[in-house]
Amino acid sequence: MGEFTLPGNPPIDVVLRRSVRARRISLRLSRLDGRVTMTLPRHVAVKEAHAFAREKEAWLRGHLSAQPTTVTLRSGAWLPVEGRMLCIGEGQGRRVRIDGEAILVPGDEARFGVRLSAFLKVLARDRLTEASDRHAARLGRAYARITLRDTRSRWGSCTHDAGLMYSWRLIMAPPEVLDYVAAHEVAHLAEMNHSRAFWDLVTQLYGDWKPARNWLRDQGAELHRYRFGD
């Protein structure tokens, strides 16, 4: 139903949505990208939403100031690739390439973000396909397809028709974290739930999965600091 801006320094954009199930006005601040969403019951006027936002302004600004800052992808910036921090530099030729502790990007610096996201998506597909193939073979189940998205609410999913979906930003996480997510989603091919039997399957495929899951809970939001502009 739109959005409005709470004035100040900096101004805060608030996305408005209406829910027939909501009983009161609520505010949600995304840990992933700092987006502010206000949910309204169907009978509440928009002017009440504005007043509620002003009432909660100090709370909002306090939590927004604690959010991770975004990273502009330009020469000299650092970008995680498979758990390693690489320094972005100007490259030659036509392809992005990794050279030691640097990731070299050809062309206009204004296009660095788009070129880097394309490079990371290809690398993510390669790594996630290899991991999914390996776990599916061990499980004895086939998947139908792999889809990559830039999801903010989940790192992966498995559909009832055996489709696997992953966030391509997993390529920025340590390899063992990417591998855990692949094992998790492949396990859903046999157990479409989070029962004890499901977690036993994840353990069989991956091993001790708790450190990788904890890494995503504690540090996963950091992967959304990087804005690629695509």
Image (spheres, helix red, strand yellow):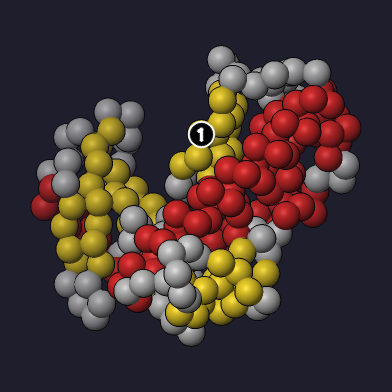
Quarter assignment of residue 7 = bottom left
In depth, the one of 55 and 108 nearer the eye is 108
Q: Amino acid at mark 1?
A: Thr
Residue 77 is situated, as x and y percent measured from the top left of the image, at 49, 80
Q: Residues within 10 Å of mark 1 (few under 14, many from 20)?
A: some
Residue beneath the point at 61% across and 64% down: 81
Q: Position of residue 100 (x, y in %)?
A: 68, 76
Tell me the residue that label 1 is attached to.
Answer: 147
Point 66% across, 46% down: residue: 127
**Where is residue 123 drawn, in percent x and y?**
58, 51
59 vs 104, nearest the viewer: 104
Residue located 16% across and 46% down the image: 2
Residue 154 visible from this viewpoint: no
Residue 82 as seen in the image, left or right of residue 166: right
The secondary structure type at the circle numbered 1 is strand
Q: Nearer the viewer, residue 22 or 108?
A: 108
- Picture quarter containing residue 8? bottom left
Image quarter of the N terminus: top left
List x then y, in percent, for residue 198: 77, 26
Q: Is residue 38 above or below residue 97?
A: above
Kindly indicate the quadrant of the structure image that contains residue 160: top right
**Image vertical order of residue 183 relative to residue 168, above or below:** above
Q: Residue at x 80, y 18 (%)?
A: 140
Q: Is residue 104 visible?
A: yes
Image quarter in which the C terminus is found:
bottom left
**Between 16 and 59, which is closer to the camera in this rendering?**
16
